Image (tube, rainbow, N blue to C red):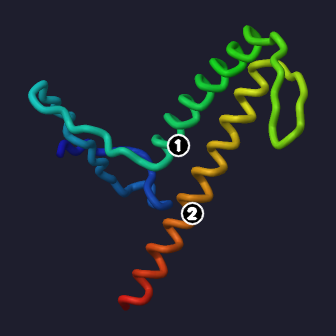
């Protein structure tokens, strides 16, 4: 570390001389650069970016598929835009997957609690 004297006043004593230390210059190597650690915030950011892209693709899909289709379900019948029918079906599948996954997680946690 290199030191440089200061001629200004330090701590109210005009005659005192202080020394300031400067850090050594950083040496950079081109061999193996260190990687930045991955964080939850970074993963969340990537997830949000992917979700935004999927949402844009979904909106484009819905705008291009506006023709009416007849949908029948449990005795009900009606006509809705094709994109809306597919969106509702996809959300239904997602809800079923969430319920099954939640039940499985609960089952595994209960099994783990009984072992302890």
- From the viewer's side, name the closer residue of 27 and 45: 45
Does the residue at mark 2 contact the one at mark 1 (Cβ under 8 Å)?
Answer: no
Q: Quadrant of residue 62?
A: top right
User: Could you tell me which residue is drawn at 60 percent across and 25 percent down?
Assistant: 54
* Residue 9 falls left or right of residue 89: left
Vertical placement of 42 versus 29: above or below? below
Q: Residue 10: where, in percent of width, then height? A: 43, 56
Q: Separation of disc 2 and disc 1 at Cα?
A: 22 Å
Picture disc at residue 102: 2
Q: Secondary structure at mark 2?
A: helix
Lower position in the chain sequence, tag 2 or tag 1: 1
Q: Is residue 35 left or right of residue 59?
A: left
Image x and y of residue 20, in percent: 31, 48
| x 60%, y 54%: residue | 98
Q: Which mark is residue 44?
A: 1
Nearer-the-camera pick, 109 or 7: 109
Question: In the image shown, does 79 or 9 lie closer to the viewer?
Answer: 79
Q: Position of residue 26 (x, y in %)?
A: 21, 35
- Neighbours of disc 1 within 10 Å: few (<14), some (14-19), many (20+): few
């Amino acid at each position: 570390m290199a030191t440089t004297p200061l001629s200004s006043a330090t701590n109210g004593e005009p005659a005192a001389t202080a020394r300031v230390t400067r850090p050594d210059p950083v040496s950079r190597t081109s061999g193996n650069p260190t990687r930045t650690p991955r964080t939850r915030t970074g993963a969340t950011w990537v997830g949000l970016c992917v979700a935004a892209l999927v949402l844009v693709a979904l909106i484009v899909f819905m705008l291009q598929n506006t023709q009416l289709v007849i949908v029948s379900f449990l005795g009900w019948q009606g006509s809705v835009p094709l994109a809306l029918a597919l969106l509702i079906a996809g959300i239904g599948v997602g809800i079923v997957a969430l319920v099954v996954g939640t039940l499985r997680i609960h089952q595994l946690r209960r099994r783990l609690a009984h072992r302890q």
